[in-house]
Every structure is written in C-alpha cells, then in structure tokens.
Image (cartoon, helix red, strand yellow):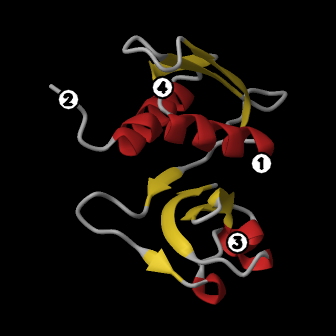
Amino acid sequence: MPVTDPIADMFARIRNAVRVQAPVVEMPASKLKVSLAELLRNEGFISSFETKALGTPEQKMRIVLKYGSRGEKVIQGLKRVSRPGLKVYRPAKKIPRVFGGLGVAIVSTSQGLMTDRQARKSNTGGEVVAFVW
C-alpha cells in the first residue's frame, strides 16, 4: 500500500529508531526528504545521511542518528504540523518558536526548506512543515 504522507512516514521511522536507540534508519528517498535530512544535519539533530540510486525507483536514504555521550537522545521529538489534509501557512513574523528557540520549526518557502530562524531573518513566510526538538 502506498504511503500517502511521505514526510510523516519519514518522521515515524526516525521516531521509532530513536526510541529503540538504533544507530541508523533506512527509508525511501525523495528530493524533499533529502532536503529535510540536510536541514536536520545542519541543525545537529542527526550525524549524517547518504542516498543511493537517486532518480531511480529503488532510491533509498540512510540516516545515521545522533546520541549523546551517555546514549541520551538528541531528537526528543518530531511533530508534523502541516499535513496533506490541513496545510498550515504563516507569514515570517508569525512563524512559531519551538520550546522558546530550543527546538526548530521547519518551513517550506519559495526559496526552499529553511529553519524558523532563517525564515524570520530573510523575512520569508511559508508552509510550516514540522517541529523538531
């Protein structure tokens, strides 16, 4: 059965892997998922990621998860905000702060995916895709 919301599927896979402290998680890849993984890596939530066979039907993405020195979770939570049935759009000044700035809101703008801080700095609103903390 095909996945109707690939981003929610990606977050569920990451959440489940973090819960059992798996070192890596694999999933089908897409350009949007690669952009999300880049953002998560740049913000320090994951160690790294790699893609295989992008542009083919067998494209896969492998994310190396990050844990603290004593095994504490770096990703405490992932929440999908905008979904296929209910899109959530915000202007730059009304993009929410996650845990007072400790977390990150991921925003899809006309310039691509960016964090809430980057969107406010460039004064660009857009679709609030997810919260990560």
Query: Which residue carries the number 4 mark?
Result: 29
Which labelled disc corresponds to residue 12? Answer: none
Mark 4 vs mark 1: in front: 4
Q: Dot 1 surroundings within 10 Å: few (below 14), some, or many (20 or more)?
A: some
Q: Residue type at mark 1? A: Glu
Label 2 sits on residue: 2
Q: CA distance from mark 4 to mark 1?
A: 20 Å
What SS does tag 2 mark?
loop
Tell me if 17 is positioned left or right of 6 in this view.
right
For residue 127, above or below residue 21: below
- Locate residue 42, reporting x and y percent: 79, 43
Residue labelled with disc 3: 119
Q: CA distance from mark 3 to mark 2?
A: 32 Å
Residue 74 appears in the picture as rendered: no
Q: Residue at x 51, y 25 (%)?
A: 17
Quadrant containing the C terminus is bottom right
| Disc 1: which residue | 43
